[in-house]
Image (tube, grey):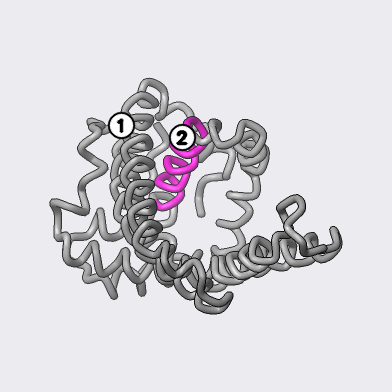
Amino acid sequence: MTQSFSKLRDDSRDALAGNYMPYFIVLVITGVLTGLLNQLLSFVAAPSGRAGFVLLIVIDLLLDYVVMILAKMFQAGQYFMSLNIARYNRVSVSDLFLPFRYDTAKAFKLCAILALVETVCLAPFTVCVSNLLYVGAFGIGTGTAVSVLAIFLLTFGGIVSLIGLELLIAFPLSQALFLYIDHQEYSARECLSRSRSLMSGNVLGYFRLHLSLIGYFALCIVSLGLGLIWVLPYLNVIRANYYMNLTGTYKPY
């Protein structure tokens, strides 16, 4: 790393000036299409709602995985837009659909692997929350008494497990989509292996970079998600600048 985190954040903020509107449109398209897929799959799986808890968890994780693949495809498009913003290149809403028009088979394979990794990372948290929902812990008058301590421990355990798994298996692969965008000659496997090489010794630093934005994430929670309209573009351009810093292609504009 040659640039400080504050430098990456400042340059990302400057590069984003004038580019929030196309990014907002991209986020709306992403949200609508992934939401529609999620609703469709939920409708198809609705008859399984009477199944046992274990089967419900399996179905829920499978549905999450399918939606996650599409989300990762769109994330690749968002990263392409973010790289264009960070490099002061031309930016277009069509950037979102890069994985659907450029080496789509490789993009799908890569996104399917990354989606599987994210689903595994989310699994403990999903199980904890689903267990609480199943027994009616968040409902009123559902008939099952669950102590506040039990709710806290399950939720806290799920969050800790999520963070731990992200650090162990997701963060080392965090640069794979950027490598797919920049290197046509790399296979999906090479994108993953080279991402691991780039992130060797940098995982905790990457985590600290995200942790430095905790105030922005808190804003998203307080605003019931509306803050993502501003925070997500900022975060993705920071990630793009971080990638360029790792690969030695960063230019201080």
The local secondary structure at tag 2 comes to helix
Residue type, mark 1 in image: Tyr
Lateral position of residue 172 relative to residue 209, left or right: left
Task: Give the labeled residue for mark 2.
Answer: 12
Task: Relative to 245, say whether 91 is above or below.
Answer: above
Q: Position of residue 124 (x, y in %)?
A: 61, 71
User: For the magenta stretch, what is the residue range?
Assistant: 229-243
Is residue 28 visible in the rendered image? The answer is: yes
Q: Is residue 242 magenta?
A: yes
| Residue 88 badge | 1
Q: Position of residue 40 (x, y in %)?
A: 33, 54
Lateral position of residue 192 relative to residue 131, left or right: left
Is residue 200 visible in the rendered image? The answer is: no
Pick whichever, 231 or 220, lies toward us. Answer: 220
Is most of the magenta stretch helix, strand or loop? helix
Q: Position of residue 88 (x, y in %)?
A: 30, 31
Could you tell me which residue is drawn at 42 percent across and 40 percent down?
A: 237
Query: How busy is the neighbourhood of tag 1: few (under 14 within 10 Å), some, or many (20 plus)?
Result: few
Q: Is residue 174 magenta?
A: no
Could you tell me which residue is drawn at 43 percent across and 63 percent down?
A: 64
Q: Quadrant of the C terminus?
A: top left
Mark 1 or mark 2: whose residue is earlier in sequence: 2
Query: How busy is the neighbourhood of tag 2: few (under 14 within 10 Å), some, or many (20 plus)?
Result: many
Could you tell me which residue is drawn at 13 percent across and 51 percent down?
A: 101
